[in-house]
Structures are given as C-alpha cells and as structure tokens.
Image (tube, rainbow, N blue to C red):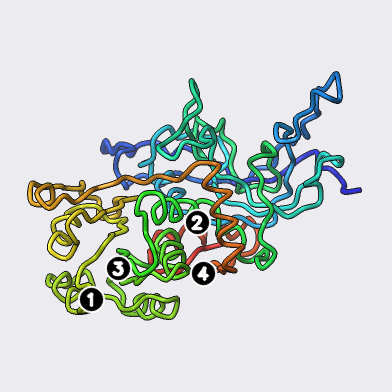
Amino acid sequence: MIELPTSQKSIQLIEQPSSANGTTHKTSAVWHEIQIKETPFEIPRPKIENEKDQVIDNVILTVKVKSFAFNHRDVWIRKGLYPNIQFGSTLGSDCFGTVISPSDHPMYGNDVLVYPAVNWLNDPRGPDVSGKAFGILGGSHETNGVGTFTEYINVPANHCVASPSHLDVMNASSVPLAGLTAFRAVFNKGQIKPSSNILITGIGGGVAIWALQFCVAIGANVWVTSSSEQKINLACKVGAKAGVNYKEDDWPKRLSSLLPTETPFLDVVIDSGGSDIAQKCCKILRPGGIIVNFGCTSGRPLSFTMAEVLKNLELRGCTMGSLKEFKEMVEFVDKHHIRPVVHTVLHGFEQVEEGFQILKAAQQFGKVV
C-alpha cells in the first residue's frame, strides 16, 4: 500500500507590485516572484451511498508528480502578460506521475499524463462545457489555482491517460500542453496529410518541435525558420527538409527555392510569431492555403490583408485542445513511438528558477523538465 501524503511542496506565484515609476502589469518589466511553499494536502474521499452510483471516470484521483515541464505560458504569467492570473496559486500545466489513490480504482499504481486544462471535452471547434470557463492548469482563476509544479495533484479520472510505455520520467511530462497544441494545429486546424508541404516558424520551442515530429510521422514535408543555424540543423536531424533564417529579409524567396519543383508551394504554415507572417508567405502558399497561428512571440499583432483574401488563404487560431484530442494525441505518440525532444532536465524544486531563466533566454531546442 502506498503511503498517502498529508502535506505537499509546490511552486506558488507571488505578486510583484508595479514599480514606482508607474509600470503596469501590461508590460514585461514585471517579473512576479515564486516561492517553494509547503501546505496541507487532502486526499478526496468518495461520497458514494450506493456502489452502483459510482462512475469510474468521475472519481477524483490523486497523482504523485514525478516530473513536470515548463511552457512559455509560465513565463508570460510571471511577466504579468497572461489573463486571469491568480496569485498564491500553483504554477505549471504539464506533469507525469503515478496514481496513488483511491486504491480500488483501475488506474491505481499506473503512470499517467494529466490533461492540462478544464472544461473542454469533445467539440473540435472549441470549449464546450456550458456555464463554465475553459482554463489551463497553473496560475489561473479558471482552474482554482491548481497547477502541476507540485508533489501531488488531485484530478478527475477521465483527465488521466496512461503514459506511453516508451516514455520515462525524464521526458514524459514534455507531452501534455505542447503536444496537444501541436496535435490540434497539425490535424484539426492544418488538416495536414502525407506529402503536404509545411512551414513551421520559430523552431526550437516545444509546440513547434512537436508539430515537426507529428508532420514527419505521417510523411509530410517540413521546412522551418529560425534565427539560429544551430536550431535549423537540429530540426533537420528531427526530420525537417531544410530551414531558413527569418532575420534575413529575403527568407521567403530563399524558402521558395527549396520547395520541390513538382509542388513549389506550401500547403500550411504553422506559426507562433504573428506579425506579418501572412504577407511574407502569401506568394509561396497555394491558393486556399492555411496559416495556423498559436502565438505571438514577435509582440506585433497578426495582420491579414486583401491580398491574402483574394488568394483565398485562411488564418486559423489554435489554442490547446479538447480532452478528446488529448487522448488521441497520446495514442498517436504511443503508436508512432515519438520521443519528446528535451533540452534540459533539472532536479528539485530549488532549480525551478533556473528553468524559467532558460525559457526567458529563448535559446533552448526542446522542452525544459
């Protein structure tokens, strides 16, 4: 029998007041503090009057967290640039762990991945739980402050999915948020098929690399952009055909010269930078091509002009995904034996700040665990 906890350590968010010169939380000048805090932990007790009333999927499971992974979302929260931040809450969206309670549940003792959100079940269009706001785990009001940078977490049983057997504690927690976002971008929004020509911008982050791995797994042709030749070379080792440096003004022209002569166009662009990506890719996207955007790291608003309209291009936003898509994504990772690309593995709560600094520097290729 696994010994059950009565307390836990977690990484909690502390508000950093605005500076005296009037800096507001809408600027990146803010950097909210974090603290390691030990708090009481309560194991949920099922309230079942009749055994036949029990629904296994509705049971709350307690998961002992073995590893958690960082996302750029965590950085945005500490910068004060994310909506609905809840101070005093636990940070983190990704985790891998073992179910330790209740002992009579079929998943007891199993290693699992936790769905990193709430209130989005099945609808491929968007969140579908009436009367409840969609939320991502970690630092937000929508999830009541529940996050994964902790020793233990209570989650609904249907939010836990058996971790693929080829993954381990060093890489499994890299899967949930980035893997889900990329899976939705590739298959739902991008509708990518074998032999499609794909551009993934800003290769190096978790979502972009997962998108590359998913595309390669089905036989799509992928090109990438980065400001780092090293990252382009690493992407090619993962399966990209080639890449171009987006700091060079003529990068769309250079990319065009790399495309196959028989299909000299892009079918889909998967983008995280925003700004004028539609204008830059307009000439090399096929008529009716798709731009899937899941971020705005450039800090400049997405623009979409009449030139793109006349070419019938589509701009599709992509944020996270449903519980159904999460389960499909984990099944895909298992079926294709995809191994997450991990940049750094840290050990212990004391090294969490180091993880944040790695993401802030934006020099990593892969996930920080």
> What is the distance, in whole Å, between disc 4 and disc 3 at their CAs?
22 Å
Residue displayed at 50% across by 56% down: 179
Type of amino acid at the residue the image marks with label 1: Leu
Element class at badge 1: loop
Type of amino acid at the residue the image marks with label 2: Gly
Q: To which quarter of the image does residue 200 belong?
A: bottom left
Given contact means CB atoms under 8 Å apart, are the residues at marks 3 and 1 in contact? yes
Type of amino acid at the residue the image marks with label 4: Val
Tell which circle, 2 or 1, labels the residue nearer the N-terminal end.
Answer: 2
Residue 88 percent coordinates (x, y): 55, 35
Residue at numbered disc 1: 259
Residue 58 percent coordinates (x, y): 70, 31
Query: Who is closer to the viewer here, 316 or 227?
Result: 316
Tell which circle, 3 or 1, labels the residue nearer the N-terminal end.
Answer: 3
Given contact means CB atoms under 8 Å apart, are the residues at marks 4 and 3 in contact? no
Type of amino acid at the residue the image marks with label 3: Asn
